[in-house]
Amino acid sequence: MDTTAKIDYKNIFYPPGGILLWIIIYLELVTFGIALVFMGLNARAEPELFHESRLLLNTAYGTINTVFLLSSGWCMAQSVHFLKLGNFSKSKLFLRLTILGGMLFLALKAVEYADKIEAGLTMGFNAFFGYYWMLTLFHVIHVVVGIIILLVLGRTLSKKPQTLKIADYESGAAFWHMCDLIWLLLFPIIYLLF
């Protein structure tokens, strides 16, 4: 299966996954960016509140989740690589590892959310936790959607790998990498800076 011959990778009008997906990715990044700017502006108005609230977060959870997502992003890149080589079994293995990384992220995030709710640190607790919940829940929704996309791609990869279009696979990979990138914006700002 020669999947690379179908795509001109030097064409700027065809980035991996297609131009429409990249428009969506840029819009998502802008949306998160705007929310982070407003969070920063609020933090400047109430620096002590934001700093004291940030200290109530578990930085270890955030760090471990960063490792989960970055590792899964690397596995997704490997999965795409092996798909392009026609090595479906290795591509499937790395896709499963990608999904596992996403599931581990969600499991640890659920533990973190349970801790926050038990401590009474809900969305209405203060401005910092309003942003924390809004931004991290929005990101969790993206991770869930990403996992669903990867599961659909994985089903095709398992049952009819020859019918899987590389452009569709790259679209799923690009969406997953967007989840990584958004977390790389959220983690240092929410867990480390304030």
Image (spheres, rainbow, N blue to C red):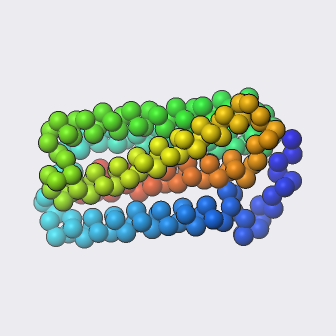
* Residue plotted at (43% across, 43% down): 66
Quarter of the figure that contains the N terminus:
top right
* Residue plotted at (27% across, 53% down): 132
Asked if residue 113 is positioned above or below residue 138 in the image, the reply reads above
In x, y percent, where is residue 32?
Answer: 40, 62
* Residue plotted at (16% across, 70% down): 45
Quarter of the figure that contains the C terminus:
bottom left
* Residue plotted at (67% across, 56% down): 17
Q: Taking 12 as reference, is 137 left or right?
A: left
Judging depth in this view, the residue of 109 and 162 nearest the camera is: 162
Q: Taking 123 as reference, is 88 left or right?
A: right
In x, y percent, where is residue 4?
Answer: 82, 51
Asked if residue 33 is positioned above or below residue 80 in the image, the reply reads below
Residue 104 visible at all: yes
For residue 109, what is the image quadrant? top left
Q: Taking 194 as reference, is 3 left or right?
A: right
Residue 90 visible at all: no
Judging depth in this view, the residue of 7 and 194 nearest the camera is: 7
